Image (cartoon, grey):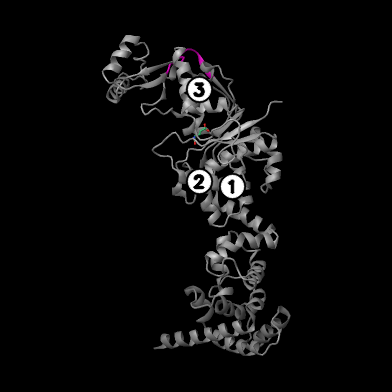
Amino acid sequence: MDTVRVRFAPSPTGFLHVGGARTALFNWLLARQQQGVFVLRIEDTDMARSTAASVEGILEGMRFLGMDWDEGPEQGGSFGPYLCSERLHLYREYADKLEAAGRAYPCFCTSEELDAMREAARAAKREPKYDGRCRHLTAEQRDEKRAAGRTSVLRFAANFDGQTIVDDQIRGRVVFDNRLLDDFVIFKTDGMPTYNFAVVIDDALMEISHVIRGEDHLSNTPKQIQLYEALGFAVPQFAHIPMILGPDKTRLSKRHGATSVTQFRDEGYLKEAMVNYLALLGWGYDDSQTVFSTEELIAKFALERVSKNPAVFDLKKLEWLNGVYVRDMDLDTLLSEAQPFFHRASLVDNPPTAEQTAAMRQVLAVLQPRLKRLDEIYQAASYFFQEVTEYDEKAARKGLLKPGSKEILTYLAERLAGLDGFDEEMLKPVFAAAMEQFQCKLGDVMQPVRVAVTGTNSSPSMYEVLPILGRDTTVGRLRNAVKFIEKNMVERST
Ligand code: GLU
């Protein structure tokens, strides 16, 4: 069997976003499954919009997701160069061939002429497409125009007869009427090839077997097929994957929040969860399975199971899935993933001291069952490392500034200060005694304690938190809370 050669061909005009990453992933999964080759090609022929920072951002996103490329930037390969801006001589060579064969011609129309042509077509209720007026210029006429200083683009002499059929691996058989095509531009006045031309030369010369890309390119495919045929190249298999929509069913964009892969990374989404979730945007194995390891995706992925329907990006589901991966991680791996987040919140140094590492480990063991995103650490871990200097307003109102809380906290501070050990075993009888003393439920005792030691009303169980904080810190915070209550009660009554 021929080797599967697939490619991801981003235009470096922004970061690697969810849609691009999903396209890359489907290609990558197929390549890994079929022991094929995954090519990364940077389509930077739009000089005005392409930036080096964007190339770097794309590579960074790819690396984060673990989608390694066999050929491409940094990696090299025998079909390079892999930056389109370094392949201009190739596009030129094939454009010359087309021109020599009478399948491409210079067009001297000015933009005013083209506008007028479109206007006239619209007025006559015809498709506003190029009418082919420069196709039949004689050599002398061309020379005259050049002598008069007219610049030209190069147009493809399209075939308007019959139909062009795309046998798409996802969409099925899609038939395009050739009459709807026009002599589209393949080289612009600035000497740059257009996307539709460059992509054909690149995919053909790089021997790409499967072109897997977004559905927005389906309408370009008949043009590209005509080019393949005119150049005598074998036509690859096409597979157009469905669009990704936001929850409001419009095309996913920045309006919907984070869309760049590195932004998700910075918000504490794990690589495995991202890969898993991206795979589910348009692909599924069966309805019962949601969690797939990357190895499993490689084994199970199939273009036949990619849906024709748009996929809706569901941030809640991604968050949930991330939580599943966080919980399944062994503590040391979680520690190394989480460390940058502790550091960013200024809770530990970089690198952390041995003591800080031990503290992070202890804290993570407690937080792990509750974390969905690692950036929750900023909030959820801070009280383990820093003094509680203020209380969440609502938590203070419900937990501290209500009758009885002051007495409960005063009582507990005293009793806890006398303990020699501070584990659950030792703590339980003290809380039981407080319930007894104040004739209340466990929650009534725990709630003020929680607010006092964490500043909030949401945290893991106090039996897990207090042993980490230790006796002196705990007692100190209970006493501070008592002072806070006294101060606020006084203010209230005056
Ligand atoms: N650079 C194009 C894009 O980012 C690639 C399209 C293709 O894969 O053919 O949309």
Looking at the rendered structure, the secondary structure element under dot 1 is helix
Q: Quadrant of residue 409?
A: bottom right
The kind of residue tagged 3 is Pro
Name the residue type under label 1: Arg
Q: Residue at x 54, y 75 (%)?
A: 386
Could you tell me the amino acid type at mark 2?
Glu
Task: Considering the whole magenta stretch, tell me its main secondary structure.
Answer: loop
Label 1 or label 2, whichever comes before in sequence order = 2
Which residue carries the number 1 mark? 63
Above or below 209: residue 73: below
From the viewer's side, name the closer residue of 17 and 412: 17
Look at the picture and state if 229 lies above or below 415.
Answer: above
Q: Position of residue 144 (x, y in %)?
A: 28, 13
Look at the image and give the residue range highlighted in magenta: 156-164
Q: Quadrant of the C terminus?
A: bottom left
Residue position marked by numbered label 2 in the rendering: 56
The label nearer to you, 3 versus 1, is 1
Looking at the image, residue 167 sits to the left or right of residue 53; the answer is: right
| Disc 2 element | helix
Q: Position of residue 254 (x, y in %)?
A: 45, 48
Per the image, is 3 magenta? no
Query: Mark 2 near mark 3, Cβ–Cβ under 8 Å?
Result: no
Q: Position of residue 224 (x, y in %)?
A: 50, 23
The residue where tag 3 is placed is 222
Kindly tell me whether mark 3's CB lies below 8 Å from ligand 1: no
Residue 151 visible, this orientation: yes
For label 1, count other residues whose C-alpha is less than 10 Å away and answer few (under 14), some (14-19) or many (20+): few
131 relative to 69 in the view: left or right: left
- In terms of depth relative to the viewer, which is nearer, 425 or 400? 425
Residue found at the very far left of the displayed protein: 148
Report the quarter where the N terminus lies: top right
Residue 12 spot, x, y in % from top left: 47, 40
